Amino acid sequence: MQPGAAPAPRSRAPPGVLAGVFNHQGWLPGVIDLPEDVEQWLGDWYGEVSPDSRAHWPVVKAKLDRMHREKPTLTPADLASITTPALLMFADDDEVEIDHIFAMFRALPDAQLEIASGTGHGLLVDKPELCNTMIAEFLLTGSLSR
């Protein structure tokens, strides 16, 4: 798409951007078992931005831990019914099993897969310019030109 050009009209659902698992079993072994220093850092960061203070972090941590271990529980068959164009963004050093990523890509009928090199699960933070460019193009046009 040329800069300043209007996006083509769409007759389908607006596109979405995904980066994560469709089933909790898609995480690589051990990645949701955070080291103590990471848990401490997350708790401190949460305390800086939360109106509930750092004292509320153990409640949030317990909920996050439970959600990562039990949810989501979608199957490839569930994904096959999603007709929304999807941009799947992952990294070459991600925390998601590569087979899980490809199962998601194969199951979604209108998906594009981007694997960014030289980064991990923090792709959006590590490579914001790349991500912003891809996401903006995808949301405006429903696909990537590459």
Image (cartoon, helix red, strand yellow):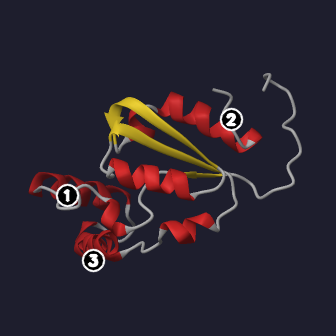
Residue 46 left/right relative to 125: left
Residue type indicated by callout 2: Glu
Answer whether labels 3 and 2 touch (C-beta < 8 Å). no
* Viewer-side label of 3, 1: 1
Give the crowd class for mark 3: few <14, some 14-19, many >=20 residues within 10 Å: few
Where is residue 110 shown, x and y percent of the image? 66, 51
Q: Which quadrant, please, contains the N terminus?
A: top right
* Residue on which the image places disc 1: 29
Q: Secondary structure at mark 1?
A: loop
Q: Which quadrant, please, contains the C terminus?
A: top right
Q: CA distance from mark 3 to mark 2?
A: 38 Å
Identity of the residue furthest to the left in this view? 36
Answer whether labels 2 and 1 touch (C-beta < 8 Å). no
Residue type indicated by callout 1: Pro
Q: Earlier in the sequence, mark 3 or mark 1?
A: 1
* Residue on which the image places disc 3: 59
Say which quarter of the image contains residue 7: top right
Residue type indicated by callout 3: Val
* Viewer-side label of 3, 2: 2
Q: Nearer the viewer, residue 77 or 119?
A: 77
Q: Secondary structure at mark 2?
A: helix
Q: Earlier in the sequence, mark 2 or mark 1?
A: 1
| Residue at screen point 64% across, 56% down | 109
* Residue on which the image places disc 2: 137
| Residue at screen point 12% across, 55% down | 35
Q: Earlier in the sequence, mark 3 or mark 2?
A: 3
Where is residue 93 shown, x and y percent of the image? 30, 38
Q: Nearer the viewer, residue 119 or 128?
A: 119
Where is residue 77 shown, x and y percent of the image? 54, 70
